Image (cartoon, rainbow, N blue to C red):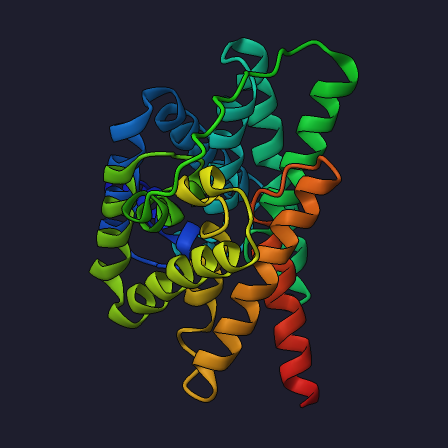
Amino acid sequence: MTPNELAGTLLRGMGQIMLQENALTGALFLLGILANSWLMFAGALLGVAVGTISAMLLKYPEKEIKSGLYGFNAALVGIAMFFFLVPGPESALLAVAGSILSTIIMNFMLRRKLPAYTFPFVLSAWVALALASATGFIAFQAQPAPTAQLDIISALSMGFSQVMFQANILTGLLFLAGILANSRPSALYALLGSIAGAAVALLISFPLGLISIGIYGYNGVLCGIAFSGNKKHAPVLALAAIVLSVLLVAAFSAISVPALTAPFVFSTWIVLALGKKL
């Protein structure tokens, strides 16, 4: 693989975080992360590189590698490690290990034709964070408490940015632009996901501060994108998954487990299964 091909592969890996196989999309996602945090930008680059190179060394199918399928879960692992843990050699090492694990899980699911989405990231990050917590060899970062006020613009924009742990309005706009660069239907359904996620959380009277920073919207964004290509019953399926994802975010919070993108994955799996039966 030439340097240009590798660069394109890594950027498509970034784009695949929101199910977009597009190098420009990936570049805009990276720019969005950099606009908020150079450390998490570094984590994203570390993860997507480790995931992609691991797949190459393990001789996974070249077509899958070039489409970015082994980069996006690893990129999320890299970002998550620098979001939850104090940055340093230990958290970087954990990011590398988690990225490799996510690549192996992704291949396992692809070989069995299972809808992986971001599940390899979720499982790998849970394992890595549990290891860090159990051993205590890496300190967790203190997260700032959200305000108690509702900010609609912030809620809708951060519904996009929080997909990659970024609480930043500009980042959210760059993420939306990245999706739009590849697919207008995906962008429309992603916007629906952010709006509907915030609206459902507001109707249930979930904390206004968490709504304002996109906590109840980002899984909805991914749910919307996942069903945007389903020409039949797409709005109904997307809305069902979005509503369920909001409830699952609250459920994970109640048991003190980092939700990550698990509400998106589980909601989408459930709706797909029910849709087939119905």
Instruction: Compare residues 211 and 239 and report the one nearer the observer.
Output: 211
Relative horizontal placement of residue 265, taking residue 190 as reference (left or right): right
- In this rendering, the answer to whether 93 lies above or below 57 is above
- In this rendering, the answer to whether 146 lies above or below 190 is above
Residue ID at (40%, 26%): 40
Q: Position of residue 269 (x, y in %)?
A: 64, 67
**Whether residue 116 can be seen here:** no
Instruction: Compare residues 9 and 155 and report the one nearer the observer.
Output: 155
Q: Quadrant of the rendered structure where residue 165 is?
A: top left
Quarter of the image for the C terminus: give it: bottom right
| Number of marks present in the image shown | 0
Instruction: Compare residues 149 and 51 and report the one nearer the observer.
Output: 149
Relative horizontal placement of residue 230, taking residue 58 as reference (left or right): left
Residue ID at (33%, 43%): 151
Q: Quadrant of the rendered structure where residue 27 is?
A: top left
Q: Position of residue 250 (x, y in %)?
A: 64, 48
- In this rendering, the answer to whether 202 lies above or below 162 is below
Residue ID at (62%, 75%): 272
Quarter of the image for the N terminus: give it: top left
Q: Position of residue 109 (x, y in %)?
A: 66, 59
Residue ID at (32%, 33%): 33
**Whether residue 149 can be seen here:** yes
Instruction: Compare residues 49 and 162 and report the one nearer the observer.
Output: 162
